[in-house]
Image: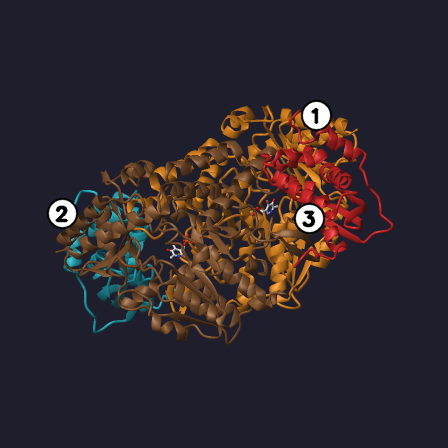
Chain colours: A orange, B brown, C red, D cyan
Amino acid sequence: MFDVEVIRKDFPILSRQVHGVPLVYLDSANTSQKPQVVLDSLTDYYTRHNANVARAVHTLGSEATMLFEGARDKVARFINAPRRDEVIFTKNSSEALNLVAYTLSNATTTPGAERFRVGPGDNIVVTEMEHHSNIVPWQLLAQRTGAEFRYIPIDDEGRLVESLIDERVDERTKVLAFVHQSNALGTVNNVEGLVTRAKAVGALTVIDASQSAPHRPLDVQSLGADFVAFTGHKLYGPTGVGVLWGRYELLADLPPFLGGGEMIETVDMSGTTFAAPPHRFEAGTPMIAEAVGLGTAIDYLTAIGMDQVQTHEAQLTAYALDALAQVPALRVIGPSTPVDRGATISFTIKGIHPHDVSQLLDEQGIAVRAGHHCARPVCLRYGIPATTRASFGIYTTTSEIDTLVAGVIKVQEMFS
Amino acid sequence: MFDVEVIRKDFPILSRQVHGVPLVYLDSANTSQKPQVVLDSLTDYYTRHNANVARAVHTLGSEATMLFEGARDKVARFINAPRRDEVIFTKNSSEALNLVAYTLSNATTTPGAERFRVGPGDNIVVTEMEHHSNIVPWQLLAQRTGAEFRYIPIDDEGRLVESLIDERVDERTKVLAFVHQSNALGTVNNVEGLVTRAKAVGALTVIDASQSAPHRPLDVQSLGADFVAFTGHKLYGPTGVGVLWGRYELLADLPPFLGGGEMIETVDMSGTTFAAPPHRFEAGTPMIAEAVGLGTAIDYLTAIGMDQVQTHEAQLTAYALDALAQVPALRVIGPSTPVDRGATISFTIKGIHPHDVSQLLDEQGIAVRAGHHCARPVCLRYGIPATTRASFGIYTTTSEIDTLVAGVIKVQEMFS
Amino acid sequence: MSVNMDSMYQQIILDHYKHPNHRGELADFDAEVHHVNPTCGDEVTLRIRVADGEIADLGWTGEGCSISQASTSVMSDLVVGSSVTDALQLQEKFLQLMQSQGHNDLAEDETEALEDAIAFEGVSKYPARVKCALLGWMAMKSAVASATGAGDKP
Amino acid sequence: MSVNMDSMYQQIILDHYKHPNHRGELADFDAEVHHVNPTCGDEVTLRIRVADGEIADLGWTGEGCSISQASTSVMSDLVVGSSVTDALQLQEKFLQLMQSQGHNDLAEDETEALEDAIAFEGVSKYPARVKCALLGWMAMKSAVASATGAGDKP
Ligand SMILES: Cc1ncc(COP(=O)(O)O)c(C=O)c1O
Ligand SMILES: Cc1ncc(COP(=O)(O)O)c(C=O)c1O
């Protein structure tokens, strides 16, 4: 049974006061808070098992390796990966997405990787609602290879213009990269339609699941894409760890990204051969404690049940959309109904800059984000400099949403 | 006053038992253990201040940003950087070294970055004693650009053949990358000689300080190189964080590496401009807690005094070299005298494979490493498959070295 | 909502935001600059007239949060009619205040010289907002440099 | 030093290491393979002769730690004279044992079938050493595949 009050007790920071009032943390899309069990697993790792992985033959090294590789197993199960060695640990989502983009340009100079080559005449497609971390890596890839960079536009409600997918994704499309759930709009995209089109033209598909992994069951097999990226710090895990999942068959043929310890098979001054996935893509000492902590966060979420999480957040979304609709002069940027959208709501308030809204909410203990949320093309699309964004998580309550609404009204009074 | 027994009390893991005997941890070159204050700072960060940095206007976000940027200040002071914005946080040393290598190949397609271009006819030079993390990134750079990859050989004592520096580093050398202290041999290189030659031919210099930063005062200004990399987990800090220091004047002109949130100035579907250093090179949510933890580790080391650390470890090295010299059939691989060498000692034992030596030491509670230590060319150079390596840190005692020597003798008895 | 004592939004800031001074386009000017804070979209266009080493007049337009708008208004009041040297010195002080992370370490007379601008002290605790408060001040500095031919960059 | 009960180095392993069986080059063979463990440099060259679905003979040379050498010796004893099917089944069991991370979950009869090879159970707790123990077994598997024309890779 999902009981938000019980869950809240697991998060020590939620009992903090801010400006003399209890913290109302509505910025989980930016980063989530961490349950005590995750902190305990970090402490346990460092005080009992810390050692470098893969390399050492001693007891601590073996324990650390088993904990680290055990975390990989947990991630694989969490996303229903067909194979554990399809799970690559990165430092965050951004690195995961860049990893794919760099291996593709590296294919240009790697014998045997011809099938991945991208060049002039080819194109790379994203959507207009992407986070910068799913825009810039592809713009840079286009610059490195001479390929064209394109995007699928969004409509007034914050949804993809589906009728343009077939035009933008064409026979020369090499990569289609898109967000599962938008961090700026809350929109949940129709994965099937996008993946089907990409497959039809033979393009690789990359899903940015940074904002969906924490909020709904994620099954890489049913998503059907080639790569899926997400980040630990939004998934109730530590900072400094992210995940790239990729189809083994592709990973096995892709050239490496970062070079260094642990990603090699054998090194020689005259040439080097590379380890099999996932290690080929994990150069240097990995984020051991962080991966272990992420594994614990996954255990925690699994015990709650991701479908329970999804139901809870769907209720919050519906409740918040209703409540915010009552506030005069407030405009929601993104889908206004709780269908195919997540628990992240961006809005503007007539006559008051989002920075002022957020700051004055902070003075009432309410933490929300203001800005373009690293998705500036979305703001450009709607002709606004920024939005205020409230985003929810497993520990969010409807009474916190009431506090938000009351807070916004107070801000309006102050500026009237 | 440096008191190793007092220091040991700060490291909770050192009171662990392994195979029923007290742990003797002699694998600090692989990764160091962490003092309690570092663990406390992680817990404090997560239970009181956790939020995403740079982006949020709320109280937690401001606190997290100040803690994270405060860690940058601490790193800058620790290495005597002229400017705090020369300090880039990475996930480890390996990423730091790859960052430099990738920005150089990215310069090939970036207008305005012509001065950094590397291409056919140019060469990149490393040494034969490098860690794979300072070999493979440069081999990959050579592959991407068509430049030649070269190395400066080592002699029987594990020192660079200085007479060959001028030949290998020539007018077409674009990068000279070398290790400050070798992780496989313990050798401390003559930085001045190498940097002087590189400067004379106009090559960029990259120092891998992964193994020196934890053991001696590090002053980037007196080293005189252009880039210096090191890693947090060997510096008594958390896993998942490393540092690249670079001259501001170079960082300001180098193109970006990873694309994503926080590294941009402004993003537009038709093009993107990039933030100033260090943020240009820090895409996505950084390893916030880890950087904070590293800052705490640096405070801890600074309170002890890095010159005290250096003195302590010099004593250990001399003691250990003497003691190991008494063991029959033991051969030290690397400098046999305590001059210009660090507290990392590799050795072989006639007739017993290093894996067996290490494993049987582990059964006596002694943690050492066996293998090629991610520096396989060193093993090739000496015609050996692997070595056993004992490496020391601030918490190592001479009585632990006695235990090691007794342990090795027991292993020999067992195999005789 | 009454503004509480430690609020970033001192009454003086709200007043300047609602009734900004020197807002408008100057017809007769020596330099015009346009500054943007890319992370939040705040922008200001500022024109300046310099005569006999004095800031003879200044006018600005722009959009943004109350902090950036009010700060630009306060800055204008302070520098119009003052010498270029004093204006730049004041800019230095304000910058220092903004970088103080909530611990104003200016001398008492320096603090006094900032007059109304001291109301922005609370902003310095929020790294993400510091740039808002600085926007107009940085624009003034560039405009002065370009009007006096000193050049903003080397 | 007496070997303690939970030591990885069971007496049987040391015995095989000091006196390895089937070590040497086979003059008459159907297949030869060379396997290397790149992370530690252990290597083995293994020749095999298959007749009537049986491993008629096997000989190996190589260098490495006591675990890899002893394991290859034990493996040789077990498979020489057995049917190819049984040898490959045994290889499967041994692989499973090595992947058990110290928790042998083989059935009792499977454990018995492994005979001396069960002495390597302790190795499974050390991921870095598992490859050492597997080296000879993997080489045998490849050699059988190539001798029987099954092919090692698709
Ligand atoms: C000399 C040297 N360089 C680079 C590295 C790589 O550091 P990391 O694994 O943290 O990336 C290491 C340690 O593994 C090292 O010893
Ligand atoms: C949709 C989306 N993609 C990518 C990212 C980047 O994640 P990270 O900052 O952890 O790399 C974020 C969050 O910042 C996001 O919301």
Residue B193 shows in this picture: yes
Write the residue at 60% across / 33% down: B59
Mark 1 and mark 2: Cα distance apart in space:
77 Å
Horizontally, is B264 left or right of D63 in the view?
A: right
Nearer to the camera, C124 or B333? C124
Quarter of image, res A38: top left
Indicate yes or no: mark 3 CB to ligand 2 under 8 Å.
no
Mark 3 and mark 2: Cα distance apart in space:
69 Å
Mark 3, residues whose alpha carbon is within 10 Å: few (<14), some, or many (≥20)?
A: some
Instruction: Point out the tag, 3 or 1, that comes first from the N-terminus.
Output: 1
Q: Amino acid at mark 3?
A: Pro
- Disc 1 designates what residue? C3
**Residue furthest to the front:** C52
Assign the C terminus of chain A to one quadrant of the image. top right
**Residue furthest to the right:** C27
Q: Chain of mark 2?
A: D
Nearer to the camera, B402 or D125? B402
Question: Under tag 3, what secondary structure?
Answer: loop
Horizontally, is C4 left or right of A1 in the view?
A: right
Q: Are marks 3 and 1 in contact (CB under 8 Å)?
A: no
Q: Amino acid at mark 1?
A: Val
- Disc 2 designates what residue? D1
Q: Amino acid at mark 2?
A: Met
The label nearer to you, 3 versus 1, is: 1
- Disc 3 designates what residue? C38
Kindly indicate whether the residues beneath marks 1 and 2 are on one polypeptide chain. Answer: no
Q: Position of residue A109 (x, y in %)?
A: 52, 69
The label nearer to you, 3 versus 2, is: 3
Question: Under tag 1, what secondary structure?
Answer: loop
